[in-house]
Image (tube, rainbow, N blue to C red):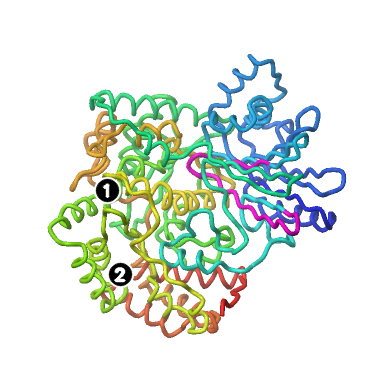
């Protein structure tokens, strides 16, 4: 795993080379083993790379990597799991190799197949290629968006920059600290910046499954898709496959994915939460490799959140080398440490145990395999059951009536009151709308959250009218929505930043695009979710491999006893001090104090309080520019 930074800027070569050097230094946590910089003869083009050595540990595989004629320059972040198979195909075409790395496979694969290469890759990747012959810069991002890739383009200044993280771009003149108020409103509403927008106005994210071409001669960019889940679902043909055959196919694809993801020249560990997904991965991995190393988080002082018993059950059953991290003592100051690595904020407190676990694991291995993606592919979230029940019940009440009742209650109910989200679901017209699942601050609350002058810049985002493809079945719509949004912009961001902060690579067998296609094309929705059960097909497979004592009804994962922590004296004092020191021209201190006070009663505002705390610290750290729209 690595970090990349690059630019194409005609003017001020010395300044841009300096910005490049500072940018890659800021990403040194992503790849501490080597740092390399390439620039062309006049300094108008530059690329830098920080390397975490996983495959072919020799200096021959350092980056940026050039071909023998210096016609192509490559900077690559990620892992290509099927690089051995692709290399064999390239050898048949006459290509010779000097390394055992997946990097050289990408370089020569691009020479052989051009942009058609990207759809052949099975892995997680953010790729940058300078095609000197055709005067192009090419960026590509993996199918599900596991690896981040930001860019900025200014046609008037003939300038283009890109980076794995925002901080890699901070020192370029093209970078602006101006906040996008639309992205801010999405962040406050959903907990992350949606789609291809970033928190900053002039910085974009390359969409997953896409490649970008910057034409140096024409000074223009074009973006194309090489893989799209939307297209896969739109072109899906219903065909009957027996349940037994589906279970067999699922097992075969998952085993192949796990086996490929064990390819490494450094030690590989496994994340084990004790849930179905990670437990099944460990169970199948034990068939491929013996003497597995497994790791989990333990909250011994908070029994409700302590998954260590369930993880230990799996570890003992499969005789793994198991290590537990005690995480009961979580100090609120950890937010200040995390903000450094989350230079685009997300409101997901599970970043804390993920970060702590990554820090522990990195002492023992450079690569860990986890279970991310199983919920979105196979229907693991509780809101799927709820949506099915509400959709069924809603047929008996006209939408206009449900909508009126919801709007009336929405105006009167205080933030954090239990049951408010269920009421919102009932106000949704499921024919052409999809509700916002994980809401933090609605527009009315955003206006109270900030100073009046500041709040006037924010426009409302309709909570229940998120733009989405609407399919015939609510489960298909919900899993598609979560895969394209929550997984990509929250879960995968959390995992990437928390692991890379500790120079650790986390791999996800469920996110092999062959398995994604199987889950969405082949598995019928009734084998994912019904009004009561979840992950129906996946659990049928898991029951064939996991011990009989395993509890299949649990749904927890790497979560945090947040309500208990926020109500502790240490956390309350810390939050009060952060509210007090925050910029009163931005934040409404009275509202923030009131939110904390309400949390002590029956209101369910722990996640909102943590989100506000994180955002206050982020503003203090990065000092973004809030330009007035008025």
Say which residue appears at 64% left-offset and 41% top-offset.
Answer: 52
Q: Position of residue 32 (x, y in %)?
A: 67, 46
User: How far across and how far down the image is residue 531, in percent?
Assistant: 18, 48
Q: Nearer the viewer, residue 452 or 496?
A: 452
Q: Residue at x 79, y 27 (%)?
A: 68
Where is residue 434? Give x, y as percent.
32, 56
Q: Which residue is mark 1?
A: 474
Q: Which residues are magenta?
A: 138-159
Is 619 on the left-hand or right-hand side of 308?
Answer: right
In the rendered image, the quadrant that contains the N terminus is top right
Q: Check the picture and name the quadrant holding the C terminus.
A: bottom right
The crowd level at tag 2 (other Cα within 10 Å; few <14, some 14-19, many 20+) is some
Comparing 557 with 573, the one in front is: 557
Closest to the observer, 547 or 71: 71
Where does label 2 land, which residue? 604
Q: Residue 278: within the magenta?
A: no
**Callout in the foreground (1, 2):** 1
* 92 to 326, vertically: above or below: above
Looking at the rendered structure, the secondary structure element under dot 1 is helix
Q: Secondary structure under badge 2?
A: loop
Relative image position of residue 190 (x, y in whole percent)? 41, 62
In the depicted view, which residue is nearer to us: 391 or 244?
391
Point 59% across, 64% down: residue: 201
Q: Residue 597, located in which quarter of the rendered image? A: bottom left
- Cβ atoms at labels 1 and 2 below 8 Å apart: no
Please tell me which of labels 1 and 2 falls first in the chain: 1
């Amino acid at each position: 795993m690595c970090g990349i930074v690059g630019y194409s800027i005609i003017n001020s070569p010395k300044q841009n080379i300096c910005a490049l050097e500072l940018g890659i230094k800021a990403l040194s946590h992503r790849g501490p083993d080597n740092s390399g910089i390439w620039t062309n003869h006049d300094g108008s083009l530059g690329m830098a790379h920080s390397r975490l050595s996983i495959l072919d540990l020799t200096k021959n595989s350092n980056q940026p990597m050039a071909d023998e004629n210096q016609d192509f320059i490559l900077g690559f972040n990620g892992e290509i799991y099927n690089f051995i198979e692709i290399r064999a195909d390239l050898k048949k075409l006459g290509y010779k190799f000097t390394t055992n790395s997946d990097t050289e496979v990408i370089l020569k694969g691009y020479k052989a197949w051009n942009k058609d290469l990207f759809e052949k890759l099975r892995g997680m990747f953010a790729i940058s290629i300078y095609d000197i012959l055709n005067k192009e810069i090419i960026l590509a991002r993996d199918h599900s968006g596991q690896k981040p890739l930001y860019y900025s383009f200014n046609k008037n200044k003939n300038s283009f920059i890109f980076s794995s993280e925002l901080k890699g771009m901070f020192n370029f003149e093209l970078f602006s600290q101006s906040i996008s108020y639309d992205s801010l409103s999405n962040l406050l509403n959903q907990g992350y910046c949606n789609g291809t927008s970033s928190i900053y106005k002039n910085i974009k994210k390359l969409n997953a499954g896409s490649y970008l071409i910057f034409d140096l001669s024409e000074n223009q960019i074009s973006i194309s898709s090489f893989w799209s889940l939307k297209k896969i679902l739109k072109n899906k043909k219903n065909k009957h496959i027996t349940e037994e055959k589906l279970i067999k196919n699922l097992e075969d694809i998952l085993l192949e994915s796990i086996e490929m993801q064990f390819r490494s020249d450094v030690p590989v560990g496994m994340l084990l939460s004790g849930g179905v997904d990670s437990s099944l991965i460990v169970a199948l991995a034990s068939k491929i490799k013996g003497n597995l190393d497994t790791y989990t988080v333990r909250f011994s002082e908070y029994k409700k959140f302590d998954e260590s018993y369930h993880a230990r059950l799996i570890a003992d059953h499969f005789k793994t080398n198991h290590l537990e991290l005690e995480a009961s003592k979580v100090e609120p100051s950890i937010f200040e440490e995390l903000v450094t690595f989350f230079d685009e904020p997300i409101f997901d407190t599970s970043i804390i145990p993920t970060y702590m676990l990554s820090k522990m694991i990195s002492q023992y291995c450079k690569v860990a395999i986890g279970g991310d993606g199983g919920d979105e592919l196979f229907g693991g979230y509780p809101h799927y059951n709820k949506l099915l029940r509400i959709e069924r019940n809603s047929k008996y009440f006209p939408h206009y009536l449900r909508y009126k009742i919801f709007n009336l209650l929405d105006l009167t109910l205080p933030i954090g009151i239990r049951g408010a989200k269920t009421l919102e679901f009932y106000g949704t017209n499921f024919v052409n709308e999809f509700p916002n699942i994980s809401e933090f601050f609605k527009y009315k609350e955003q206006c109270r959250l900030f100073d009046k002058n500041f709040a006037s810049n924010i426009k409302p985002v309709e909570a229940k009218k998120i733009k989405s493809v609407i399919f015939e079945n609510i489960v298909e719509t919900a899993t598609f929505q979560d895969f394209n949004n929550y997984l990509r912009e929250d879960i995968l961001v959390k995992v990437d930043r928390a692991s890379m902060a500790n120079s650790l690579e986390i791999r996800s067998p469920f996110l092999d695009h062959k398995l994604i296609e199987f889950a969405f094309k082949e598995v019928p929705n009734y084998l994912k979710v019904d009004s009561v059960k979840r992950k129906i097909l996946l659990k049928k497979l898991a029951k064939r491999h996991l011990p009989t004592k395993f509890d299949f009804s649990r749904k927890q994962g790497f979560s945090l006893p947040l309500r208990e922590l926020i109500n502790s004296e240490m956390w309350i004092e810390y939050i009060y001090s952060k509210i007090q020191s925050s910029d009163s021209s931005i934040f409404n201190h009275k509202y923030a104090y009131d939110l904390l006070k309400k949390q002590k009663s029956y209101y369910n505002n722990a996640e909102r309080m943590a989100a506000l705390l994180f955002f206050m610290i982020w503003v203090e750290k990065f000092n973004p520019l809030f330009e007035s729209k008025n």
